[in-house]
Image: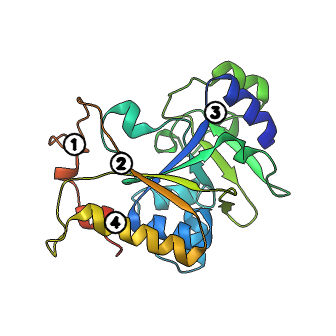
């Protein structure tokens, strides 16, 4: 679909921002190149990014070169940490307007981890504006807004880039506090990429489980992989 078609449907559904969560190392790569990049783009240019278990399957599905975003802040809405990482990029919805030639915007019907290899394109995506308008529900985590771009890079819009950074209240293996280390790495990467950035610390609600020992909590995750500037 055209970006403008998806824009109208999402705006009507109450979406004002598109979000992308990732680790600090991958986010630093994005900041240095000036946009959200597909896994394939980063791999082709031999830049740093955190490995993901879904990479082999994404290649088989043909989505390794797509850029994925959500219409909701998953951490905030689910009250637990985002599995993909502690750095949340917040892009205005109008990033859908004025995309480069040959750009395509697709919205998934379900998270690709639930796809079957033999499924049709129509089973995986909303193919028309009418289908999307009928089937899109605000806050459904499975309905990803994906960008299929010629070079696999969705450039950041003009103006300050909004980023939310989680604080795990944990230390790295070198005994340094993870949050200020991550903050410094992101700011340095933004300077190198010439990106104006506004980073705010996430303020969780009182019932958020990101620190309480649940399956996706930070006290049961690899803090070094999530927050340090190393693979």
Residue at point 69%, 28% (across, down) = 11
Residue at point 46%, 66% (across, down) = 26
Q: Give the label on residue 83, or none.
A: 2
Residue at the far right: name it: 101
Q: Give the label on residue 14, or none.
A: none
Q: Nearer the viewer, mark 4 or mark 3?
A: 4
Q: Disc 4 vs disc 3: Cβ atoms closer than 8 Å?
A: no
Q: Is residue 109 visible?
A: yes
Q: Position of residue 32 (x, y in %)?
A: 56, 73
Q: Earlier in the sequence, mark 2 or mark 3?
A: 2
Q: Nearer the viewer, mark 3 or mark 1?
A: 1
Residue at point 16%, 72% (across, down) = 173
Q: Nearer the viewer, mark 1 or mark 4?
A: 4
In depth, the one of 75 and 133 nearer the eye is: 75
Residue marked by disc 3: 123
Distance in Å between CA atoms under marks 4 and 3: 39 Å
Q: Nearer the viewer, mark 4 or mark 2?
A: 4
Distance in Å between CA atoms under marks 3 and 1: 30 Å
Q: Earlier in the sequence, mark 4 or mark 2?
A: 2
Residue 16 in which image quadrant: top right
- State the SS at label 1: loop
Residue at point 52%, 70% (across, down) = 190
- State the SS at label 3: helix
The answer to whether 175 appears left or right of 63 in the picture is left
Q: Earlier in the sequence, mark 4 or mark 3?
A: 3
Q: Earlier in the sequence, mark 2 or mark 1?
A: 2
Q: Is residue 49 visible?
A: no
């Amino acid at each position: 679909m055209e970006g403008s078609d998806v824009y109208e449907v999402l705006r009507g559904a109450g979406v004002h921002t598109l979000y992308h969560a990732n680790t600090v190392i991958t986010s630093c790569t994005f900041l240095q190149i000036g946009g959200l990049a597909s896994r394939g783009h980063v791999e082709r240019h031999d830049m740093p990014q955190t490995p993901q278990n879904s990479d082999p399957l994404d290649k088989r599905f043909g989505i390794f070169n797509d850029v994925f975003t959500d219409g909701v802040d998953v951490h905030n809405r689910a009250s637990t940490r985002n599995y993909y990482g502690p750095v949340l990029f917040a892009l205005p919805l109008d990033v859908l307007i004025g995309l480069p030639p040959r750009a395509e915007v697709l919205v998934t019907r379900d998270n690709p981890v639930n796809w079957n290899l033999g499924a049709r394109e129509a089973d995986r995506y909303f193919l028309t504006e009418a289908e999307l308008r009928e089937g899109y529900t605000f806050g459904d985590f499975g309905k990803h807004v994906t960008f299929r771009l010629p070079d696999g890079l969705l450039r950041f819009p003009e103006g300050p880039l909004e980023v939310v950074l989680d604080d795990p209240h944990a230390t790295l293996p070198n005994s340094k506090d993870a949050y200020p280390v991550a903050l410094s790495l992101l700011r340095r990467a933004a300077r190198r990429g010439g990106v104006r950035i506004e980073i705010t610390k996430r303020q969780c609600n009182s019932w958020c489980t990101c620190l309480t020992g649940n399956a996706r909590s930070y006290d049961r995750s690899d803090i070094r992989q999530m927050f340090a500037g190393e693979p």
